[in-house]
Image (cartoon, helix red, strand yellow):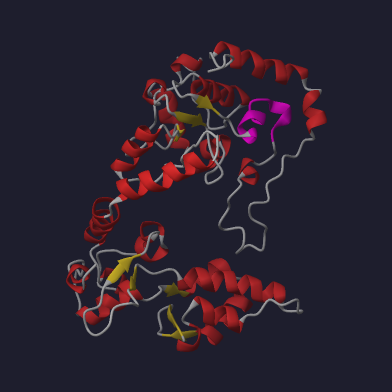
């Protein structure tokens, strides 16, 4: 992007201040307190940041890159490894909390810039607002449009997609499935279809937005599922993330064919509701239906975990809380599940009843 294009998202204030808001990491005292216990948060604030008042901080020059932070907080088997590891993770995250980057390959005054890939999900972006503060320097809507223009429309995804995916398909005699969730350019779906690559469909994350996917909207070349490693389980979504969304899933008839017609909504995702949602996904036109084991176990009351939030696989906030990430393990031994004859019979019957028992 050119400097003029970045200038176009300035809402008020002078250009230098707006460019700093775009290019520099956004650090607030509230963020440090959120991620670290207060004694450690204050220690980090004094050591690594300049304090500009009103809870606004900036990295000191000697700690303003990921490399510098790593050198200042070594983890080499010493007594401070746990503390340094936690600080590293938090400070690295704050260092990346920016909207744009300068192209380091540009010489002279003709600078070029890149918006960050995760800009729309960054704290820096979500803090933007239309007021007189530093967070009101940029026009959030214009910046959002510029991001989509750059990443979705300007990039030539088709040719490179065909090249790389063809190489992947030709490398082994395996069925290829694409993780095509989130911000995906329209031409990506064309390439996947052209090459016969399956996509991934989650009922609550329809491509292009909208509330939910209906059974007939799942393409044949896809894998239908209830959740995945990067989101909450079905029960956690229903009870903790979006209870209003779960209510809409029922009230607008998405579960009618799975036995939900005329049923009353419950804020608790009972085993019966888990069964109905899983069945609705199994009934889709997707070539494959692959259900995470957490959502399968939630269909049977005695097999459920006490808190569905503990069943998530990727929990980005775990590191800040001093917990392990990507550490989910099924609580039950396979031998125990083999003895749950009623549960196994229930799943077997569902597979047959939804037409999933035959081979392609």
Residue visible at 48% across and 40% down in the picture: 170
Q: Nearer the viewer, residue 335 or 140?
A: 335
* Magenta part, dominant SS: helix
Magenta segment, which residues? 293-304
Q: Is residue 112 left or right of residue 354?
A: left
Q: Which residue: 60% across, 74% down?
A: 87
- Left or right: 146 as drawn, with respect to 270: left
Q: Quadrant of the N terminus?
A: bottom left
* Magenta span includes 42: no
* In this rendering, position of residue 42 left or right of residue 195: right
Q: Is 53 located above or below residue 171 in the figure?
A: below
Q: Please indicate, yes or no, whether residue 132 appears anywhere in the rendered image.
A: yes
Q: x%, y% of residue 179? A: 46, 42
Magenta segment includes 295? yes
The front one of 295 and 69 is 69
Q: Is residue 100 above or below residue 276?
A: below
């Amino acid at each position: 992007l050119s400097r003029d294009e970045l200038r176009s998202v300035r809402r008020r204030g002078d250009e230098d201040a707006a460019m700093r808001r775009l290019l520099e990491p956004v650090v607030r005292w509230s963020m440090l307190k959120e991620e670290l216990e207060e004694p450690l948060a204050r220690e980090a604030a004094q050591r690594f940041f300049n304090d500009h008042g009103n809870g606004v901080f900036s990295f000191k020059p000697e700690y303003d890159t990921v490399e510098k932070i790593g050198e200042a907080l070594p983890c080499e088997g010493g007594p401070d490894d746990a503390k340094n590891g936690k600080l590293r993770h938090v400070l690295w995250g704050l260092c990346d909390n920016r909207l744009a980057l300068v192209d380091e390959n540009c010489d002279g005054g003709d600078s070029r810039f890149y918006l960050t890939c995760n800009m729309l999900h960054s704290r820096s972006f979500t803090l933007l607002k239309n007021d007189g503060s530093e967070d009101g320097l940029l026009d959030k809507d214009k910046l959002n449009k510029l991001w989509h223009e750059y990443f979705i429309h300007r990039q030539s995804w088709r040719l490179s997609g065909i090249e790389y995916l063809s190489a992947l398909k030709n490398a082994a005699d395996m069925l290829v499935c694409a993780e095509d969730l989130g911000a995906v350019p329209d031409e990506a779906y064309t390439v996947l279809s052209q090459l016969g690559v399956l996509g991934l469909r989650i009922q609550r994350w329809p491509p292009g937005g909208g509330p939910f996917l209906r059974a007939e909207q799942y393409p044949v070349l896809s894998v239908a599922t209830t959740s995945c490693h990067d989101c909450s389980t079905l029960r956690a979504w229903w009870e903790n993330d979006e209870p209003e969304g779960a209510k809409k899933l029922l009230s607008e008839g998405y579960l009618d064919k799975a036995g939900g017609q005329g049923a009353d909504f419950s804020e608790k995702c009972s085993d019966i509701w888990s069964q109905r949602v899983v069945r609705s996904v199994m009934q889709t036109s997707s070539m494959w239906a692959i259900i995470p084991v957490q959502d399968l176990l939630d269909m049977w009351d005695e097999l459920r975990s006490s808190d569905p939030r503990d069943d998530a696989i990727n929990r980005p906030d775990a590191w800040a809380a001093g917990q392990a990430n990507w550490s989910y393990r099924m609580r039950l031994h396979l031998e125990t599940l083999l003895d749950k004859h009623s549960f196994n019979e229930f799943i077997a019957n569902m597979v047959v009843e939804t037409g999933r028992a035959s081979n392609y």
